[in-house]
Amino acid sequence: MQFSLRYFLTCLFLLIVEILIALFVHDTIIRPYIGDLLVVILLYCFIKSFFAMPVFKTVIAVLAFTFLVELLQYFNIVQWLGLEHSKAARIIIGSSFEWKDLMAYVAGAAVVILFERRKQASCSV
């Protein structure tokens, strides 16, 4: 276990952006897809805030988690849990499966990998 202030602050920033998107953006691109892309980066930064895990393993773990949540949406997990009347639960967990969300998660993972590779390249120069 190793705390990283940089990842933690990035995570907090992304959390604020995600909350603002959820509260104020009601479009067909930013909220559903950019929000999903950003959530992968947010979760990655959250994990890296506390654990010195390898980049690829962390990205795969985050992707597995986001894919699992999307699969649970397919099986209407919000209704199963009796939370269909909770706006917060519907926003956080999600209430509808969408194949395009999986692509947004993969895009978020790609952004993380590209950023981390660029960071490593600049550190080794």
Image (tube, grey):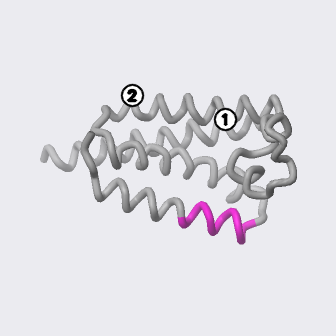
Amino acid type for the residue under numbered disc 2: Lys
Residue position for label 1: 69
Which residue corresponds to the image point at 72% horizontal and 67% vertical from the top-left? Answer: 25
Q: Position of residue 33 (x, y in %)?
A: 67, 50
Give the side of residue 83 with respect to residue 66, left or right: right
- Residue 52: where, in percent of width, then height? 27, 38
Disc 2 on helix, strand or loop? helix
Amino acid at pointer 1: Val
> Is 23 in the magenta?
yes
Going by the image, does 101 lie left or right of 123? right
Numbered range of the magenta stretch? 16-25
Q: Distance from label 1 to label 2 (Cα)?
A: 18 Å
Q: Earlier in the sequence, mark 1 or mark 2?
A: 2
Please rate how many residues cluster around mark 1, counting C-alpha atoms within 10 Å: few if below 14, some from 14 to 19, many from 20.
some
Taking the image as shown, residue 9 lies to the left or right of residue 15, namely left
- When asked about the image quadrant of residue 50, the answer is top left
* Front one among 120 and 55: 55
Q: Residue at x 63, y 42 (%)?
A: 104
Residue displayed at 72% across by 39% down: 100
Q: Residue furthest bottom?
A: 24
Look at discs 1 and 2 and give the one toward the viewer.
1
Prevalent SS, magenta region: helix
Q: Is residue 48 above or below residue 59?
A: below
Relative to 70, is 116 above or below? Answer: below
**Residue 6 at x, y = what percent?**
30, 58
Of 88 and 63, nearer the camera is 88
* Image quarter of residue 2: top left
SS at circle 1: helix
Q: Which residue is mark 2?
A: 57
